[in-house]
Amino acid sequence: MPHDPPDGVNPNPPQDPNDVSRAEFLKGVGRSAVLIGLGAAGYATWNRVTSKLARERELTKRPSQGPWYAMAVDIEKCIGCGRCVVACSKENNVPEGHFRTWIERYVITKDGRVLISSPNGGMDGFSDDMPESDIERAFFVPKLCNHCETSPCTQVCPVGATFLTDDGVVLVDYEWCVGCRYCIQACPYGSRFWNRSKRTADKCTMCFHRIQKGLQPACVEVCPTGARIFGDTNDPESPISVFMRENATMTLKPHLRTGAKLAYKGLSKEVV
């Protein structure tokens, strides 16, 4: 089954009444993600499996003289403060109620339930609304566009408005976008939304306007714990290369083989 966004995250808002024909046009377009279950494997077993996979898999690297950008997240360092979401919204003028990046909180209860929440995208932080005695463990997972090398969104766009740059960033050309919303439906990570003011698809750009000037993405710059790591994977001494070399990491939904350039350290089986 497709993985729906958690409460508080709505990448596909209700259709504008003027867009009914487009909505009908997209009825036949489904998500491409198919989740693979892990059966009754224990948490310790999961950690051993992910460590082995991580040693065998690195973020996609393209032979090039130029940069090939990627991002990583250290889940163990994320405190769910929401500063990254606020910074992204301000830096990129993201419409209210939508998010180019957001934070999900996962709470695993002692009776085995998995509770996922993301109130207002995690922008305002999270409240303690459950007794600690009921919680087995809890953690935060920042989400955003995975900037895939073999991205479903670029493959379904009928006019080439969404594309992969030479340095590995997936962008949307707002002048070319015809508003068909195929890409929104095709993204297996739920990272795209309909921008009503622009009347185009919208998503994370890794703050392309910043990284072209040698700056960090806004979300990376403001993180108080260093949970987000960004850099050029073609540079062996870049922060991202060092982090990937020194830590076991995984990407989300690796079975889809999208060539995702967003990796996680400490990714739990409940998230994949």
Image: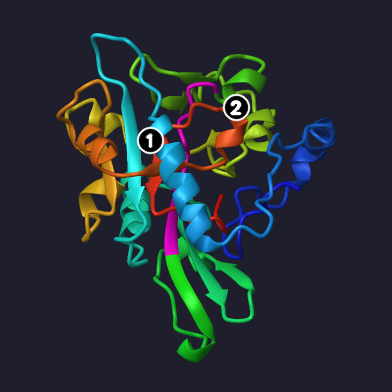
Q: Residue at x 75, y 39 (%)?
A: 19
The residue closer to the viewer here, 66 or 37, is 37
Residue 148 colored magenta?
Answer: yes
What is the distance, in whole Å, between disc 1 and disc 2 at their CAs? 28 Å
Q: Residue at x 56, y 49 (%)?
A: 272
Element marked by disc 1:
helix
The residue closer to the viewer here, 236 or 118, is 236
Name the residue that disc number 1 marks.
55
Which residues fall within the magenta stretch? Answer: 140-150
Image quadrant of residue 114?
Answer: bottom right
Please name the amino acid that badge 1 sits on. Answer: Arg
Say whether residue 205 is visible: no
Looking at the image, what colour scheme do you see? rainbow
Alpha-carbon neighbours of circle 2 within 10 Å: few (<14), some, or many (≥20)? Answer: many
Q: Earlier in the sequence, mark 1 or mark 2?
A: 1
Q: Residue at x 41, y 38 (%)?
A: 54
Q: Residue at x 48, y 51 (%)?
A: 99
Q: Is residue 55 left or right of residue 15?
A: left
Element marked by disc 2:
helix
Please name the amino acid that badge 2 sits on. Answer: Cys
Image quadrant of residue 9?
Answer: bottom right
Residue 67 colored magenta?
Answer: no
Give the percent coordinates (x, y) of residue 149.
48, 22
The residue closer to the viewer here, 205 or 258, is 258
Name the residue that disc number 2 marks.
153
Alpha-carbon neighbours of circle 1 within 10 Å: few (<14), some, or many (≥20)? Answer: some
